[in-house]
Amino acid sequence: MFSEILDAITSTGDGLFEFSGHLIRSRVNARVQGYASNTLPFGRLWHGNPVPGRLVVQEHDAEKAGKHWDMRLVVGNRAISFVPGSSKTKIATGEKFSVGRGRMSKLIKQPDHTAKYADWEGTIEEGYGKGKVKKVFDKPILITKMNNKEMQFALDDQKVTIWKPGTKGVGPIKSAKADEWVMNASGASTAAVRPLPKGKYIVPNDVHIKALIEDGSYVAQDKIDGSNFTLVISKDGSKHLISHHKSVNGGFIDRKMRVPEKLFDNLPNGTIIQGEVWHPKGPYVTASILNANPLTAYLKQKQLGLLRFTAWDVAKIRGRDISKQPFARRRELLVKLGKESGVDVVRQHEVPNMPALKRALHGSIRRYGEGLVLKKLDMEYGGNPPMVKVKPTHIIKATIERINNGNGRLSNSMGALTVKTEDGKKCQVGSGFTDVQRDYIWKNRHLFKGQMIEVEYLDQTQESLRAPRFYRLSPTQATVDMEKWPR
């Protein structure tokens, strides 16, 4: 993907970058020694035009200066260059950019180079820089602020800031020289920012649903086919969009750098909202954007349209904790907040009987939904009593335990999957696949074992599912490359 991005970003010589026919104005002013003349506020990826670029680190084993690492921000035909304040500071190695989160490091500004020099490797034969040069790090970045006092860019899940001491409060350098700058990186999530409970669900039968809605204490909301997130607006105004799925290291994942910040611009500080991030083109597009690096996510949305956020519950507004209030009251406050701030709030339906429920269900499916969720008016935040999913058929998540070879015409392909649900039920899923999907799974079976899929079924027994049928790969939990998955 990185090579594709580099091929797609080409300087047109007039301060523009071209991607798939879209022109993204870089606002780079070459007359100011490689710096842009205006400031782009960080995080506002769709306000104005952020600058696609690259972060390159070269290992320079110089005879006079000693071994050190050169850091270059490549923008257009310029490579804005720095070296660490200490030659012992190793900025990057392989895939890792090793600036400590929350820790400030001193940089020394160097003369700018052309962009081509950032890719050069070889031996400098003479002069002060005589020695070997080797590129050790090269990744796409999204530059969101750039002037002669401060620069900011998004690298994977880090926000990296470089600034001149004295321009951003107190820095670690008391008497900085003209060429000295400071750099730090803030992580995507912190231990203090955690997702709130996702909520508990049950999948009932029609008799159970009829009894619930005729009781009059339940309402229905659209169930949007996206990814569930907790949106946190801290007291200081910083924003976090926290996933309910943990990273491979067990930490919480923040996706704020992949979602247009204008969706949350007018929300007050001290607010916590739960909602769904989704895309009109479906859950696979949503997953491909959320799981990409910030630059790729930005470019994909330039091409496919922006992600959206729809709120469906709220725990805190302006620092006031309302999580203990009944759901009906939280809904009133959320609707009011949505009108004040422009945040989309999920549709809610009165469903006094089964015909009303079916009408609401059909309408929800047409609006990019995947069904309805019944919620009791006095439900606590987090789902007590549990929320009730209503879908055209029952769908459950299951893990692939075994990939079985087919028979007859499928003798060289996948015949069925042995899967296990979260509550321990096992079954064989052999229908719902296209022949192309069967072949793809069989050829890549080493990748599919342990993957999460969604299974459609009619009913459950004590040990298995009745009439199981493959519905889809889990858009949020499957880790295979969704762009290669045959539809």
Image (spheres, grey):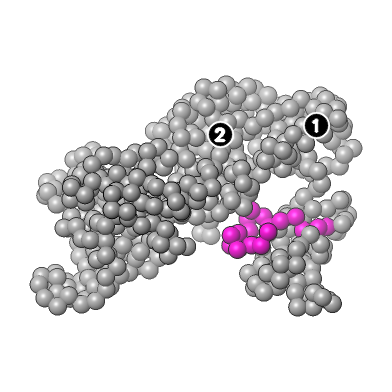
The answer to whether marks 1 and 2 mark residues whose Cβ atoms lie closer than 8 Å is no
Name the N-terminal-most of marks 1 and 2. 2
Residue 261 percent coordinates (x, y): 45, 38
Q: Is residue 219 above or below residue 35?
A: above
Residue 406 percent coordinates (x, y): 80, 74
Let me know if residue 470 is in the magenta part.
yes
Q: Main secondary structure of the magenta part?
A: loop
Identify the disc placed on residue 359: 1
Residue 339 percent coordinates (x, y): 55, 23
User: Would you call the spot at circle 1 few (<14 residues within 10 Å), some (14-19), or many (20 or more)?
Assistant: few
Residue shown at the point (86%, 31%) measured from the top left:
354
Let me know if residue 189 is in the magenta part.
no
Residue at label 2?
Answer: 273
Label 2 secondary element: strand
Left or right of residue 355, residue 143 in this image: left
Task: Please state the extent of the stretch shown in magenta in the rendering.
Answer: 468-487
For the residue marked with disc 1, what is the amino acid?
Arg
Residue shown at the point (59%, 35%) measured from the top left:
310
Count up the numbered dots.
Answer: 2
Residue shown at the point (64%, 62%) measured from the top left:
485
